[in-house]
Image: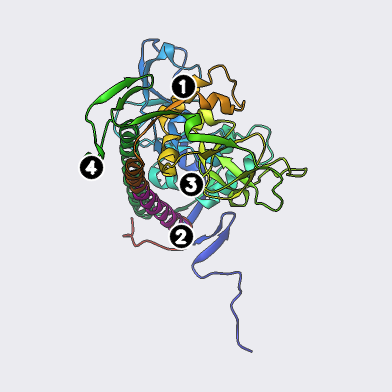
Amino acid sequence: MPKTKNKHTKPSYKKTKLGWIPNDWEVKKIKEITLVDKNSLNGNTDPNYRLNYISLADIDNGRLINEPKEIIFSEAPSRARRIVSQNSIILATVRPNLQSFYIQRENKKDIICSTGFAVLDSKNNYDPNYIYHYLFSHAMSAQFYALVVGSNYPAINSTDVKNLKMAIPVLLTEQQKIAQILSAWDRAIEIQTKLIEKYELRKKALTQQLLTGKKRFEDFVEYKGYQKTKIGEVPKDWKILSAKEIFENVSIKKNNGEELLAVTQENGVVPRSMLEGRVMMPTGDTKSYKLVEPGNFVISLRSFQGGIEYSDYRGIVSPAYTVLKNKIDIDKRFFKYFFKSDEFISRLAVAVIGIRDGKQIAYNDFTFMNFRLPSLKEQQKIADVLEAADNEIKVMKETLEKLKEQKKGLMQQLLSGKTRVKVKEEE
C-alpha cells in the first residue's frame, strides 16, 4: 500500500500557537525581544525641560498626522511620561485593535507620550522595523481582539503587552529584508496619501473661489467687477436670491413599497441597503415618511455640521427630515457642491445660532438665507470643473486602496513565512 503524507504536516514548517511557521523561525513574547517602557520621566524632571509631546489623537494607522507639540514639562499632561527615542515603537494600549502604532524613525529630539502607550525598544538581534510591521499582522490582531472583546473598557495593561507573541525569523538579515519590503510599500502609500491630501486642499480652494465668484471663466463675464452685498462681494453679473425663491419644501407621504433611504454626511442620500453594518429600520408603518426623488436635497438633523445632502435615488425618508425641490432652473450639481462648502456650513451655523446639537433645522430657518447665483451655463461650467477634480481624486484613492491591499497580501505571506526572502547566512 503506497504511503500518504499526513495532511496536517508541512515540509520545513512547524505548527505553533500562531499557526504554521518555518522551522528556522521562533515564536517570541514581546518581553523577550524588546524592552517595554525602558525610559520614563519622573517627579525629579526639571519643570522647564522642553519636550515634544504626542497624544493618541496624533497617530493614525502608523502615521503621525500632527506634529509633536513642543511644551515644557510643567505644562505637560499629567500622564506624559514615556520617552520615545529613535527606533522606539509606540503601541496604544487603549483600543489596540484600532492599530494606533508608530515607529520613531527620524533622528531628532526624543518625543514624550502618555502612559496610554507602551513604548517598545528592540533588543540586540531583533529588528525594530520587523517588530513594528508585525503589530499590524492578522496574528497580532487576533491577540488584541481576544484581550479586549467583551471588556467594559477596551484596553490592555503592561503585562498583556509583554506577553503578546510574534513569529520571527532567527536570522536578523531575514527580519531586516522583510521589513525593507514592507517599508517600501509604506513609502508608496505615504506618497499617495500626501498626494491625495494635496489635491483635496487644491480642490477645496478651487471650490471656494468658484462658488464665490473670486475666480471666473472669461466666457461668462458680462460685467467686470463686484458688488457689495450682505453676504459679501458678489460679481456684478450674478444674482442674489433667497433660498425660498430657489427651493420649496415638498412633503409627499403615503408612498407604499418605496425603498428606505439613509441621509448621511459622507455619502449623501443613499439606500439603506448600501450601508455597511447594522442599520436601524422603522418598527411601525412608513405612511408618514416623505418621498425623495433624484435631484432633491434633504436637510438632515446635523446639517449645521455637514451641510445639506443631495439624492441621486428615489425612496422615502423619516418625516423628521425636510425635503427640498428646486422651483427654478438650476444646475443641481452646483448647489450640491455649494451646500457642502465651508462657507455655506459656517453661514448656516450663524443662521441657526442657538439650536442645540441634534435639533432639526426648520425650513423657515433655511428660507431666510441668501445665495449667489451665476447664470445657468456658468453654474454648469463650475460644476463640470469641480466634478473633474473629484474624479481625479477618486482615481487616486482607488490607487491608494490597491496599494493597501497589496501590502496586506504581502504581510500575510512574509510575516508568516509562507513566502520566504533570500538572505545571506549570518554567522
Mark-to-mark CA distance, 4 and 3:
53 Å
Q: Amino acid at mark 1?
A: Arg
Q: Percent from the top left, x then y, of residue 266?
A: 50, 41
Picture residue at 61% right of the left edge, 27% below the top? 358
Q: Nearer the viewer, residue 17 or 343?
A: 343
Question: Which residue is the site of mark 1?
Answer: 81
Inspect the image, locate mark 4, and give the three-letter code of the amino acid beneath it.
Answer: Asp
Disc 1 residue crowd, few under 14, some 14–19, many 20+, Cα 10 Å: many
User: Which range of residues does the magenta coloring cover?
Assistant: 391-412
- According to the picture, the residue beneath numbered tag 2 turns out to be 413
Label 1 or label 3, whichever lies nearer to me, is 3
166 shown above or below 223 = below
Q: Is label 1 or label 2 in front?
A: 2
First in sequence: mark 1 vs mark 2: 1
How far apart are the alpha carbons under marks 3 and 2?
A: 13 Å
Residue at left offset 53%, top offset 52%: 138
Amino acid type, callout 2: Gln
